[in-house]
Image (spheres, helix red, strand yellow):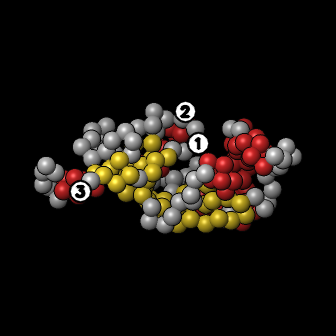
Amino acid sequence: MGATIGRWGFAEPGPLRDELTALALAGTKMTTASLALEFEIEGAELPAVGQRDLLVDSTDRPVAVVETVSVRVVRLADIDDRHAIDEGEGYADAAAFRTSHERYWTESGVVDQIRAHLGDPAWSITDDALVVAERFRIVERLGPDAGVDELSADGSLDVEAREQRFRGGDPA
């Protein structure tokens, strides 16, 4: 019997997603951040500690199983240096993180989506903007042939078959 798990990728498909995914797979990227309003707009629940999801690449191919280790909803001004550094993108501190993320959220259209959602064309990112700061770990890397028997395109994972494979048996 399959259990459906979530799937997500960093940023939008393309070079940035590929770079961030490679950093996560290398163990360099251990945190990520989104504006809390993005979850509201998408009608998505915040990640929960212990939650496992599929990390997908730019072609929407699952490349890893990730587990949420911690989740904090904090003001943008309260993102700390540790979170910024653990993003793995070369930020020296929270100020560099903020500059980069504000640029991304503006240039990628997230700010415009929020303005439309709120009906407030003057909305802007401020110190008080709420950020979902997530820490995660790679539980399992999925190669091109890994998990073919257990994983379908819709994110359905046959947990029993996967556990049987890890025990060395035939999942028949």
Q: Which amino acid lies under the numbered mark 3 shown in the image of this protein?
A: Glu
Q: Secondary structure at mark 2?
A: loop
Q: Which amino acid lies under the numbered mark 2 shown in the image of this protein?
A: Gly
> Label for residue 160?
3
Q: Would residue 86 be visible to someone looking at this image?
A: no
Q: Are marks 3 and 1 in contact (CB under 8 Å)?
A: no
Location of mark 2 (residue): 14
Location of mark 1 (residue): 11
Q: From mark 3 to mark 2, how far is it between C-alphas?
A: 34 Å
Q: From mark 3 to mark 1, how far is it between C-alphas?
A: 32 Å
First-in-chain label (3 vs 2): 2
Q: Residue at x 27, y 47 (%)?
A: 150
Q: Residue at x 55, y 33 (%)?
A: 14
Q: Position of residue 167 (x, y in %)?
A: 17, 59
Q: Position of residue 24 (x, y in %)?
A: 47, 50
State left or right for residue 22 relative to residue 124: left
**How many numbered discs sit on the rendered protein?**
3
Q: Nearer the viewer, residue 161 or 32?
A: 161
| Nearest-to-viewer mark from 3 and 2 | 3
Q: Secondary structure at mark 1?
A: loop
Q: Quadrant of residue 168?
A: bottom left
Q: Nearer the viewer, residue 99 or 64?
A: 64
Q: Would residue 9 be visible to someone looking at this image?
A: yes
Q: From mark 2 to mark 1, how far is it between C-alphas?
A: 8 Å
Q: Are marks 2 and 1 in contact (CB under 8 Å)?
A: yes
- Name the residue furthest right: 122
Q: Secondary structure at mark 3?
A: helix
State left or right for residue 52 relative to residue 152: right
Q: Residue at x 54, y 35 (%)?
A: 13
Q: Quadrant of residue 126?
A: bottom right
